[in-house]
């Protein structure tokens, strides 16, 4: 699978001239090309979102197994600093680079007070959304989108 995740890795290595440390494939998230790695002393989770043919936007699963083997949302206490979700469709190709706090504030990561989500929908800047919830979701997500063409070290 490492060969499949080359878009982001190639960008990091060619544009930024850096090697990723502690690269590890997430065998439970192969459908989303899941992996984790370290860059500039920051811990990253990577997933590639799927285009959904009947709904606007893309969907990504973001979960882990607990000690009992049950799937659960990532915890706010997980040792990751950023969550990178790649999207690729006709109109938008790029990365959502979410700092942990943005996913906590928006209910994606679990906290002691509220359970997070095992997956969520992403809306790229060019996506035209039709309902109130999608508009609200797109509004906070857009701040974290970087197109593949403008991706560089400052993006991380």
Image (cartoon, rainbow, N blue to C red):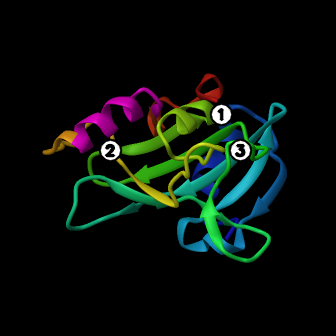
Q: Which residue is mark 3?
A: 44
Q: CA distance from mark 3 to mark 2?
A: 21 Å
Q: Quadrant of the C terminus?
A: top right
Dot 1: few (<14), some (14–19), or many (≥20) neighbours within 10 Å? few
- Give the mark nearest the N terminus, 3 or 2: 3
- Are the residues at dot 3 and dot 2 in contact (C-beta closer than 8 Å)? no
Query: Would you say residue 125 is visible in this rendering?
Result: no
Q: Residue at x 60, y 48 (%)?
A: 110
On residue 57, the disc is none
Label 1: which secondary element: helix
Give the camera-side residue of 4 and 99.
99
Q: Residues within 10 Å of mark 2 (few under 14, many from 20)?
A: many
**x and y percentages locating residue 93 in the rendered image:** 39, 46
Q: Which of pointers 1 and 2 indicates the residue nearer the eye? A: 2
Badge count:
3
Residue 134 is covered by the magenta coloring: yes
Rendered-image quadrant of the N terminus: bottom right
The vertical placement of 27 against 8, above or below, is: below
Please rate how many residues cluster around mark 3, counting C-alpha atoms within 10 Å: few if below 14, some from 14 to 19, many from 20. many
Q: Residue furthest bottom?
A: 69
Counting residues from the start of the chain, the first of labels 1 and 2 encountered is 1
State left or right for residue 4 relative to residue 129: right
* Vertical placement of residue 44 versus 68, above or below: above
- What separation in Å lies between label 1 and label 3 (alpha carbons)? 18 Å
Secondary structure under the numbered disc 3 in the rendered image: strand
* Residue stretch in magenta: 133-145
Residue on which the image places disc 2: 123
Quadrant of the rendered structure where residue 66 is? bottom right
Whether residue 97 is visible here, answered yes or no, is yes
Q: Which disc is residue 15 wearing?
A: 1
């Amino acid at each position: 699978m490492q060969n499949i995740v080359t878009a982001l890795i190639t960008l990091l290595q060619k544009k930024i001239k850096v090697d990723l440390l502690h690269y590890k494939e997430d065998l439970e998230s192969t459908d989303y090309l899941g992996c984790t790695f370290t860059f500039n002393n920051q811990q990253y989770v990577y997933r590639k979102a799927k285009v959904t043919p009947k709904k606007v936007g893309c969907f990504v699963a973001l979960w882990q197994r607990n000690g009992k083997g049950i799937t659960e949302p990532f915890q706010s206490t997980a040792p990751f600093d950023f969550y990178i979700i790649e999207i690729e469709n006709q109109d938008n190709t790029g990365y959502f680079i979410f700092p942990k706090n943005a996913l906590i504030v928006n209910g994606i990561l679990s906290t002691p007070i509220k359970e997070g989500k095992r997956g969520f929908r992403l809306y790229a800047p060019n996506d035209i959304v039709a309902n109130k919830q999608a508009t609200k979701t797109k509004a906070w997500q857009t701040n974290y989108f970087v197109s593949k063409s403008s991706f560089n070290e400052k993006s991380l």
